[in-house]
Amino acid sequence: MAGWKSLKDMTVLSKPLPRLDGPDKVAGQAKYTHDMHPKGLLYAGLLVSPHPAARVVKIDASKVRRLPGVKAVLTDVHPTGTVRYAGEEIAAVAATSPEVLEDALELFEVEYETLPFVADIDSAMQENAPRVFANRPNIRDPRVRGEGDVDAGFARADAVVEGEYRTQVQTHSTLETHGSMVYWEGDELVIYDSTQAVHGVREGVAKFLDMPVNKVRVVCKHMGAGFGSKLQPGRYTAIAARLAKETGAPVKLMLTRKQDFLGGGNRPNSISHVKLAATKDGKLTAFYAKTYGTAGIGTNAGIRLPFIYTIPNWKHEHYDVFTNAGPARAFRAPGCPQASFVMEQLMDELAEKLNMDPLEFRLKNDSNATRQKEWRLGAKKFGWQRRHKKPGADTGRYKRGMGLAASIWWPGGRGTKATMTIYPDGTLDVKCGTQDIGTGTRTYMAMVAAEELDIPMKRIRPMLGDSNFPKSGASGGSTTTPSVGPAIKNTSERAKTKLMDLAAQFLGVPATDLAWDSGTVYMKTNPVKKLTWDELCQLLGTETLEVHGQWVEGLSSRGVAGCQFAEVTVDTWTGQIQVNKIVAVADCGLILNRLTTESQVNGAILQGISYALLEERHMDPETGTMVNANYGDYKILGAKETPAIEVIFYDEPERGVIGIGEPPTIPTNAAIANAVYNATGVRMYELPMTPDRVLTALEAHQFAGKED
Amino acid sequence: MSKQNSSNKISRRSFLKGMGSGILSTATLTTGGLLSKEAAARILGPEGEAIRGRTTITLTVNGRAHRLAVEPRTTLLSALRDRLNLTGPKEGCDRGHCGACTVLMDGKAVLACMTLAVDARGKTITTVEGLAKGDELSPVQKAFVEKDGLMCGFCTPGLVVAATALLQENPNPTLDDIKEGLAGNLCRCGTYPKVFEAVQTAAKSMRKGG
């Protein structure tokens, strides 16, 4: 199997090419699940529990059923009848119009027996707190990891820092909510789903409905983002399928914005009690962390400590805590933005204690060879030497500061299959059962085939987002590109081999006498004897050529480094943090499309800023429900908060394709927090760094200063 | 442990839509504590017919007049998407927070989810589908593609329309003008830097007459 061409020989790959679905998207022609509108469509909706903990005593849907335009009602959609978070599905209805649906949802009469609840982690951890699950304590058994002798490590240290850090619950809040449009063709179910995993949804829904997998087809040509919240099959899909079965009509069921906030997934919070130590020459000796996090009624609220650093002695005890809140789902680099907030600030605190520059301190403790180069490259581009040596050096209302933080991720490729169909007119289809979640998958599928076959992009139709296509995994974990890229390359190579066999037959020579160059097959010994791409394809006559290929070793690898630098201005009167600039150094091996890759890095950084400064799920302790379950009160970064971003790619094409969706969102919050400290001399121990928290911290600092 | 019933609550949607159209339902008026049930019924009829009824209106969208039946509470967004199958404008929040539903009404950017269909009678509506001339994308659309001012693309129709309105009002915007002009459009993928480039590129090409 041949490797990738060298960068200088590439004519299509690694160039900045506009995405192929761009014209459809800017013209409003790209159809999302939300836009599906077949004839006879019924509008379905869910009635969800307003209570965080309750038993459903009775559901009276008689008024709903009597409403003209209501076509089907389901009152058995909750699996147990015991509600554990506000937002769980209780009933569903399908109606002939959005207006009838709206009226119908108001006519359900549900009797609940409400139960005690714990809607936030602090109340859940109290002694005698109500239990989320009657038979299990809220605090789960710890997961303990580590190496070396922590006590000995602390004993031989010259400097120790410790503290408590907190990060918030963040919701994915994708612009297209979760949902499906489904219809039946006989006993076969067709699902249009806003998903990151067409194959996974097919298998999951088949299981929900107890039907054969091959009778379910899942389609997702365009979807309004996922960030990890759409990796799994949704109960709403199975509900829509039941409503469609009962009515014999297509049914669309999209969660409302509020329902999506409540149950559509989130990033767990974290509470970290941590301690880090080093010798006076700046070598880390020990780290200890005791952490808590809530994934609501779910699990896996872990935090990836000790992050990127090599520490000979460390121990991390983590406890998941159940709360009556929607279950967490994988969210862009699970466990990592939390870890960078904690670890990168601890590193800065320790550097200061050792009277060392934060960059120098990192270079001493970062064992990643790529990141060693990236730190230096980024520092130079950013102008790290302009940083105030003394925190809070600016006088007056506005204070500027600089900070940095590291990135890491472990993506890699995995089994993906693809098919290529070549037509006699020289056009071809590339099919793969992956998804384009806004990452440009469709575009680089065509780019890989164009590069390998040396034919124009416009001849190639990339096809994805259909479970009838060859299997590929979920688009998560930054694994899509390192999985799909090699599979398309492998399929293209096999197509080339088959076409060369055809040419050999036609020319009456062994295939070994032939060579491929610029989309043309020619005889090595007599290069005038050749067949162009069009002539080759014409040899197919009236047939098509079907070629199957798959992911193979050697074209991708795993593991990325990366680092970021932030410059901020803090308004010490209002507590407002303004991010002025982010410089990001990112590596992901061979970059397939420089334009869309840059977009992904930008987006990851902006989500990082949003996480750092704005986003937070607020649970009301009285009602146990999320009080800011809308885009007005749940703040997300917009155009005005977008700073200048400079992305520097550290190319490592020799490593093959890797993946970049997640890593650049990890360091941003910590680089900003460190910059805020550099600006003000005040450390922020809690996310998001909202003006109220900044002012409180500034005041506490000022007050402490006066007492000295 | 208490027993609670939840039903028949007035939704924000019907309340807002009632307020927006100047028509209120009996339930809205009484639940909101504005009027007694009797007074509300006297104004609206006992079943709130004034808001529940259907009416046929004409909407001029992308240069074509459409006759369609809507209810007084039907939003312009729902009329476009659910009646006319113009699904370019997206529903991201249904309460004017995200801008994904932005359309032009008499040349001005408006939020279709916060506009009632009946209030759009007699106005000229342009959706994102109406910006291209045949297969020829508008300068703003072309620049969004070229600069990659989109990722998942769900917010893109709203951003493209908002950018179009912005450039009509201010053909030579500064970066800050662009940020201000697009502040009502949420992009969860974080495409803003490329969107800013796209708007600057479009402005340049439009000034040249492109």
Image (cartoon, coloured by chain):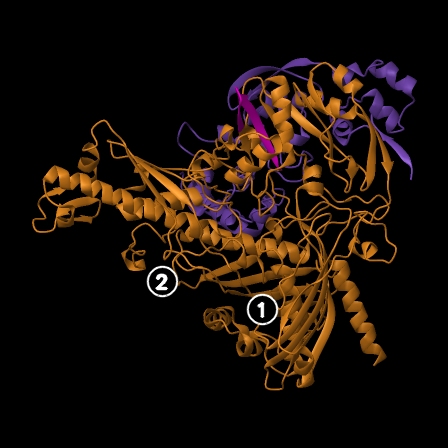
Chain colours: A orange, B purple
Q: Which mark is residue A654?
A: 2
Residue type for callout 2: Glu
Q: Which residues are magenta?
A: A178-190
Residue A232 point in image, percent of width and height? 59, 42
Q: Which mark is residue A404?
A: 1
Position of A332 compared to A299: left or right? left
Q: Residue at x 19, y 43 (%)?
A: A500
Determine whether B160 is above or below A669 in the image. Answer: above
Nearest the viewer among A671 and A347 is A347
The chain ID associated with circle 2 is A
1 vs 2, front mark: 2
Q: Is residue B161 visible?
A: no
**Circles 1, 2 touching at the beta carbon (< 8 Å):** no
- The quadrant in which the C terminus of chain A is found is bottom right
Which element carries disc 2, helix, strand or loop? helix
The quadrant where residue A304 appears: bottom right
Q: Which mark is residue A452?
A: none
Residue type for callout 1: Leu
Q: Is residue A183 magenta?
A: yes
Which element carries disc 1, helix, strand or loop? strand
Residue A38 point in image, percent of width and height? 54, 21
Q: Residue at x 69, y 41 (%)?
A: A263
Nearest the viewer among A371 and A674 is A371
Q: Report the predominant secondary structure element of the magenta stretch.
A: strand
The chain ID associated with circle 1 is A
Q: Is residue A115 visible?
A: yes
Residue A527 point in image, percent of width and height? 10, 48
Nearest the viewer among A102 and B164 is A102
Nearest the viewer among B202 and A629 is A629
Q: CA distance from mark 1 to mark 2?
A: 28 Å
- The quadrant in which the N terminus of chain A is found is bottom left
Nearer the N terminus, badge 1 or badge 2?
1
